[in-house]
Image (tube, rainbow, N blue to C red):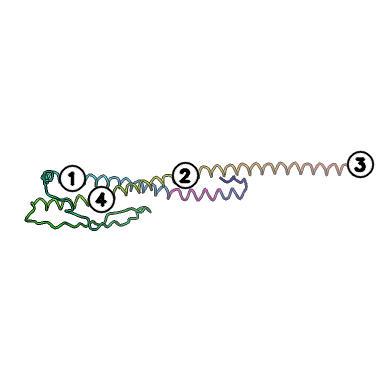
Amino acid sequence: MAKLKLSKQSLQKQRELLKLYKRLLPSLDLKRRQLTLETQKAVQEYAAAQSALDTLDTKIGVELPMLSSSEMDLAGLVRKTDLKVREQNLVGVKLPILERVEFEVADYSRLATPAWVDVLVERLKEAAEERFRVEIGRERVRILEQATRRITQRVNLFDKILIPTTKKNIQRIQIFLGDADRAAVVTSKIAKGKQAEQRELSLGGGSRQ
């Protein structure tokens, strides 16, 4: 850290810095509060998606209990063919958001397979899409929490370090300059006093001759 210069120029610079810090702090704090709110919303959305997935898994178990005893090969019955995730700019933070998911269903004979397979296909697509929502929701929470921590650190830096330190610097320079001015006044008075004494001595010496 550079040593503080105790000069009028340095005082002006510190005052300008203080104005800058005070001007930036409210906008930083506003962004912190906005990100905190968005993080809370993202946490709620993530929890809702996870809950929906859990509910769907339970529903599949209730609707299709025959899955546990079925000897049918259902692997590859539903396959994801397209996943579109776009970018969302939220309070200056880039976040993923699910736009669409498309699936391909393997060919199977409606006549040769049980009717419940049709239900299973729909539930598998729903569950897969919900899992993507959970994953993206988790990532949104992670990104927002990280952004909130960073902006909180910046707010604390300005509020607890930069502004108080700059105020102390200004006070320190003002005290130094004030002391210097008073010392200069005293020195000037002493010098004037000596000059006056010398004039008096000079005049007094001339009158005795």
Horizontal side of residue 204 vs 26, given as left or right: right
* Residue 170, quarter of picture: top right
Residue 38: image location, x then y, percent: 33, 48
Tell me the tag on residue 133.
4
Q: CA distance from mark 3 to mark 2?
A: 74 Å
Q: Specify few, some or many for label 3: CA neighbours under 10 Å numbering under 14, 14-19, or 20 or more.
A: few
User: The C terminus is located in which quarter?
Assistant: top right
Q: Nearer the viewer, mark 3 or mark 1?
A: 1
Q: Residues within 10 Å of mark 2 (few under 14, many from 20)?
A: some
Other-residue count near label 4 (Cα within 10 Å), few / some / many at <14 / 14–19 / ≥20 = many
Q: Which residue is mark 1?
A: 57
1 or 2: tag closer to the N-terminus = 1
Q: Are marks 4 and 2 in contact (CB under 8 Å)?
A: no
* Helix, strand or loop under label 1: helix
Image marks 1 and 2: residues in contact by CB distance under 8 Å = no
- Element class at badge 3: helix
Please name the residue that numbered disc 3 is placed on.
Answer: 208
Give the Cα separation between the discs numbered 4 and 3: 110 Å
Q: Nearer the viewer, residue 7 or 196?
A: 7
- Residue sitting at the far left: 111
Determine the CA span between mark 1 and mark 2.
47 Å
In this view, the mark in front (4 or 2): 4
Query: What amino acid is found at the position of numbered circle 2 in the picture?
Result: Leu
Mark 3 or mark 2: which comes first in sequence? Answer: 2
